[in-house]
């Protein structure tokens, strides 16, 4: 019953907004036919965590649509025909880049050919590169030392660089959000400071990370953790670990006296359990690719840091 009531109310509000828009257009004095496009520019963001920050920057200045449903794996997500149409109709498409949206690569290149403006977040940062001893396989081109890491959102200061560049891009297409962008970037630097302080209780020797795939490189670089290895030794969750990879990881866990294995979206629970059995190390799930229920980046990054700190403290 209450659902029906909400639907009716929503419909009424929608109708009121439409009437108001039409009045506003007629007051503007234009004699031309109303444009089929909505009044506000349309920004389409590929990925949920990036989308949350874009919403913070844009406010009411544009309509923001996030393509991938929160909780889907950005490394494997595939667009529908409707999603492809939404991308082609956007005034601006915001993507992460560096191969994160692997299932969208061909579509994004078609959208660019269609002269839709595209903002690639990783074009505006100094990308982290896969380093020595991170479990990368030097015989595989995709895993080579030096490969660029797409997981920029695990460092709020890198996200602040993206926000500043996005503010400039939006101004260049007459979406004026420079004050909001400056405020969001400032808030991200405050968050970074809070996270740094929350790490004070952890000695540097404790700060060792084993993750589901190579997802926490930016976080590790910022907060002085050492990446010991990953269950899937790849920048994408869509790769697979070989028996040799697993044996090597068990050795690394024992040699480095690692205390926690962090699993995430795309990590096999069976593999994590068997690692825990072989090494006696506890397994803790951490959210690295999914927004919390409140849809907030600030909550996301705070939860990520506090889950990691708590795992080492307990
Ligand atoms: Zn990932």
Image (cartoon, rainbow, N blue to C red):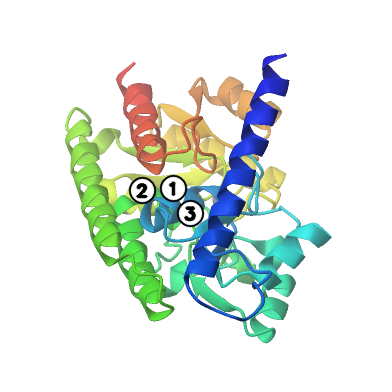
Q: Is residue 41 visible?
A: no
Q: Nearer the viewer, residue 57 or 128?
A: 57
Which quarter of the rendered picture does the C terminus lie within?
top left
Q: Position of residue 65 (x, y in %)?
A: 59, 55
Q: Earlier in the sequence, mark 3 or mark 1?
A: 3
Q: Are marks 1 and 2 in contact (CB under 8 Å)?
A: yes
Counting from the top left corner in percent of width and height, residue 110 is at 72, 79
In-image side of 77 versus 41 (left or right): right
Q: Position of residue 98 (x, y in %)?
A: 54, 68
In this view, 86 is above or below 74? below
Is any atom of residue 219 visible in this view? yes
Query: Mark 3 = which residue?
Result: 50
Closer to the chain start, of discs 3 and 2, is: 3
Q: Is the CB of mark 3 within 8 Å of ligand 1?
A: no
**Residue at (63, 81) in percent of width and height:** 32
Q: Which residue is mark 1?
A: 216
Q: Which quadrant of the view contains residue 6?
A: top right
Q: In x, y percent, where is residue 140?
A: 64, 67
Mark 3 secondary-structure assignment: helix
Q: Nearest the camera: 42 or 222?
A: 42
Left or right position of 5 against 297: right
- CA distance for labels 3 and 1: 16 Å
Q: Residues within 10 Å of mark 1 (few under 14, many from 20)?
A: many
Labelled disc at residue 219? 2
Dot 1: element:
loop
The residue under the point 48% across, 61% down is 62
**Residue at x 48% of width, y 54% of height:** 50
Give the foreground label among 3 and 1: 3
């Amino acid at each position: 019953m209450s659902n029906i009531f909400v639907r009716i109310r929503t419909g009424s509000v929608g109708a009121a907004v439409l009437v108001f828009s039409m009045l506003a257009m007629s007051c503007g004095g234009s004699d031309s036919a109303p444009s089929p496009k909505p009044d506000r520019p349309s920004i389409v963001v590929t990925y949920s965590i990036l989308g949350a920050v874009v919403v913070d920057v844009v406010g009411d200045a544009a309509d923001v649509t996030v393509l991938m449903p929160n909780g889907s794996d950005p490394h494997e997500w595939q667009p529908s025909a409707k999603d492809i149409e939404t991308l082609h109709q956007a005034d601006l498409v915001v993507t992460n880049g560096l191969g994160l949206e692997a299932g969208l690569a061909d579509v994004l290149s078609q959208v660019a050919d269609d002269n839709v403006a595209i903002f690639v977040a990783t074009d505006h940062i100094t990308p982290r590169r896969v380093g020595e001893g991170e479990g990368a396989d030097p015989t595989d081109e995709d895993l080579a030392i030096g490969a660029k890491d797409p997981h920029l959102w695990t460092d709020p200061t890198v996200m602040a660089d993206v926000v500043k560049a996005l503010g400039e891009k939006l101004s260049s297409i007459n979406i004026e959000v420079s004050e909001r962008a400056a405020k969001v970037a400032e808030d991200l630097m405050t968050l970074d400071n809070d996270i740094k302080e929350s790490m004070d209780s952890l000695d540097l020797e404790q700060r060792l990370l084993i993750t589901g795939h190579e997802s926490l490189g930016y976080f590790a670089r910022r907060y002085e953790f050492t990446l010991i290895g990953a269950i899937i030794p790849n920048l994408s969750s869509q790769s697979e670990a070989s028996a040799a990879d697993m044996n090597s990881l068990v050795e690394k866990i024992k040699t480095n006296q690692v205390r926690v294995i962090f699993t995430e979206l795309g990590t096999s629970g069976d593999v994590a359990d068997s690692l825990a059995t072989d090494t006696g190390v506890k397994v803790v799930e951490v959210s690295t690719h999914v927004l919390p229920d409140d849809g907030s980046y600030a909550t996301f990054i705070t939860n990520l840091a506090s889950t990691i700190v708590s795992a080492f403290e307990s």
